[in-house]
Image (spheres, helix red, strand yellow):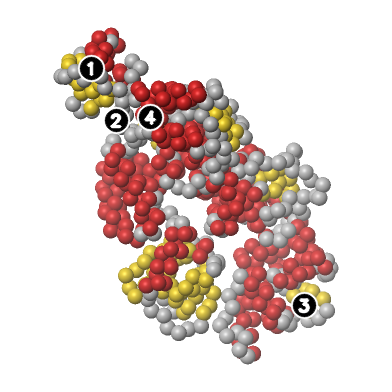
Amino acid sequence: MAQTHYQLLSRCTDDQLRTICQMRRLPLPQFWEDGPEGRVRLLKTMVFHLEDHKRLANTLADLDGDHLKALKRLAEEGLQPPSHTVESLSERGLILPDGTQWTVVESVTDALADFDEGALTFQGEDDVVLEPAPSHGFALALTSVLLRCMGGIRVLKGGLPAKKELGQILNRNGLLEEERDATLAFALLHRLGFLWDREGRVNTLLPAVLDHPSRWVAERAFAKLLEDDLKLWNLPPAEDRAFLMRHLLERQGQILAVQPFLTFLATLQPIDEKRTREVFLPFLRRMGLVAMDAEGQHLSLTAHGEALAREYLLRDSRGTEAHWMPFMVDQPLVIQPNLELLTPMGQNPHRLLLLAQIGEVEAMDAMLNLRLGADTLIRALDAGVSLDEIRQRLEEGGANLPQTLRQLLEDLAHRLGEVEVVQGVRLVKTRTAELAQELTVRPELASLQFEALSDTVLEAKGPGNAFALLKQAGFLPKPGRYLPLSLDGDESLYLWALACLAFVNEKGMNHHLEPVKHMIQAALQRVQSEDPALFSEITRRVPMLNQGGGSQGQEETQRILEYAVSYNLMAEITYIPLAAHRSQQRRVTPQAIEEEHLRAFCHLHQEEMAFRLSRIIGVRLLSEKGWTPSLHSQAG
C-alpha cells in the first residue's frame, strides 16, 4: 500500500527535515523540537507547504535536465535515481525514503506531468565553445551614448535621434554597432532623466549623472530594460524578459541549449519564444550580458549579466561590488603633441564624462579617443568649467601636458575675461582702454552701437547680443551662465537644490523630507490638472533628482537603523519577505545589527525577528520610543 506524504516524511530524521525546510524555504514552527507534539506540527506544516503546486513547480524549475529526467523516470517507471542526483533531490524533499529505496509522492508526480519530455534536456554538451562576450558591455554602451551627447544632438519629435544624429552616436563606436541598439540605449537613458531635451536638442545632464554612484546608470537602465514597454524595438513583453533573466540567473555557470531551454520555460508560463529567441537574446549577446556560440544555439549568463540580474532580481548590491571595481578607478591618460587624448574605456565613467566635457569624442572602443582644441576648451569654459579645473582633469591621470597644450592654456588664461558682459544693463567692460577703442571700430560689432561711458566701459545701444557677437569676433568674455540646462533658468536655485539633496542623502535624513513631500504632492496635483504636459516633464525629471519613491541605498539604510538602535527609537521599514513578491511596511524596534541581519522586535507579529538587510529597501525613523518584551527570536 502506498505511503502518504505525511508517513514518508515521518521516516526522515530531524536533520533531514531541517535540511528540506532550509532548501525549500519553509517556516519552522516554534518549539518543534520539544517533544512529539512539536514534530507532529512540523510534519503537518511541511506537508501543507510542500504540496503547494506553485511552490512545487518553481522548485522543479530550479533543477537541471539530469535531475528532472531522473525524477521523472522514478515517478513514471520506478527507476531509482543515479547516485549523483540523490542528494540534491532528497534535500529538496522531492524524493523520500521508503524502506531501502526512494519514492516520489503523488503531488510531485502530478507536477512533473506539466514538464514536457523534450524540454528537460537543455544542458549544453561539454564540447560547446562560447564566443567571448565584451566585458561590462551593457554599461560601456550606455556610457558611449552619454559621451556622444555631451555636445548635444538633435532629436525627432518622437524623442529619438534623427538619422544623421544616430550616425553621430554610432560613428567610430566599437561598443554600439547597430542602430536599434543605439536607439534602445538612448531611450533607456532618456527615461532615466539623464538626457535633457529642450527644443528638439538633447544634452547629457551631467549633474544628474554625477549625483549617482558610477554603477547606478547601468543598474537602473537594466531595470528599465526588464520593466518598460519596448514594443518599438519588437522586444517580447516585460514579464517575459524578467522571467528569462530570473531563470538564467538560477542557472549561472551553466551552458544551455537555447531552443530546449525556451521550450522548458514555456512549460512554466506562456512566453513569446520567437521574439525572445530572435530579438531579445541577440541584444543580450551584443551587450555582453550573455555569451553564445557562433551558431547562436547555446548560451550562458556572463559575469556582467549575473551582476546586473542579481542586483535587480535579488537586490544583492553588496555581493556584486567586486564586479564593479573597474568602474571605481581612474586609468592613466596620454596626451599627444597633436592634442589627441587617449585613455581606457574601462574606468570610472564619471571621469570619462568630465574629460568629454573639455574634449571632442573621436572614437570609442577599448580606448576613448578625444580631440582637444581651442574650440573644445572654450565650450567647457562656457559651461562653467574653470581653467584650473581643466588643467586638474588633464593632469590627474599622471599625463605630461605637451608644450602645444600648455601654450593653448596659457593663451586662454590671458584672453579669458579680457572683456566682460554685464547682463541686464548691457554694459561691456574691458581690461584696457586700447581694447575698448578696438571694440568700437570692429565692423562685426557695429550692430551693438557701442557708446563709451569711460575708458574701459562701453554701453551697447543696439539690438544685438553682445555676448554672442563678441565670441564670434574671437574674444573670450567671462562666462555669465554656468547651468544653462536648468528647468526654469534660475541656476542658483537649481544648484542649491542639488547641494541640499546630496546633503540629505549623505546624512541619511530622508525622513525629514516628509512635510516637504506633502507640499510637493499638492503642488503636482495642481500642475497635473492645469498643464498635463508640464506634469509629464516634471515626473520624468524628478527621479533623477532622488525625489521619487525609489529604494534607499543600503549604506543609508544601515546608518539610520544604527541610529535607531543607539537611541532606542522605533522605525518603519519597507521589507520584502522571502515568500512574498511585494514589499511590506513593518513597524519595528531595532535592537542590533548582526552581520547581514537586523535583529528587531516586530510590532506586527509581536515577537523578536531577524530581517535580512538586503531585503530592507527603505527605512523611516519614528518619533516614538522603542518597546521590546522578552520573547524568543525567530528569523523573518
Residue shown at the point (61%, 65%) measured from the top left: 54
Q: Name the residue nearer the viewer: 143 or 377.
A: 377
Q: List the residue tagged with mark 2.
A: 480
Foreground label between 1 and 4: 1
Task: Work out how far the residue at label 2 is from the one at label 4, CA to CA, in angstroms.
Answer: 10 Å
- Amino acid of disc 1: Ala
The picture quadrant where one finds residue 319 is: bottom right
N-term-proximal mark, 1 vs 4: 4
Q: Are marks 1 and 3 in contact (CB under 8 Å)?
A: no
Which type of secondary structure does the marked residue at label 4 adopt?
Answer: helix
For this rendering, which residue is in front, 23 or 343? Answer: 343
Which mark identifies residue 381? 4
Badge 3 is on which residue?
A: 97
Horizontal side, residue 496 vs residue 148: left or right: left
Alpha carbon separation for disc pair 1 and 4 = 25 Å
User: In percent of the image, x 20 and y 13: which residue is there?
Assistant: 449
552 with respect to 364 (left or right) = left
Which is closer to the viewer, label 2 or label 3?
A: 2
Q: Indicate which disc, 2 or 3, sits on the residue closer to the N terminus.
A: 3
Between discs 2 and 4, the one toward the N terminus: 4
Q: CA gap, disc 2 to disc 3?
A: 81 Å
From mark 3 to mark 4, how far is it between C-alphas?
77 Å
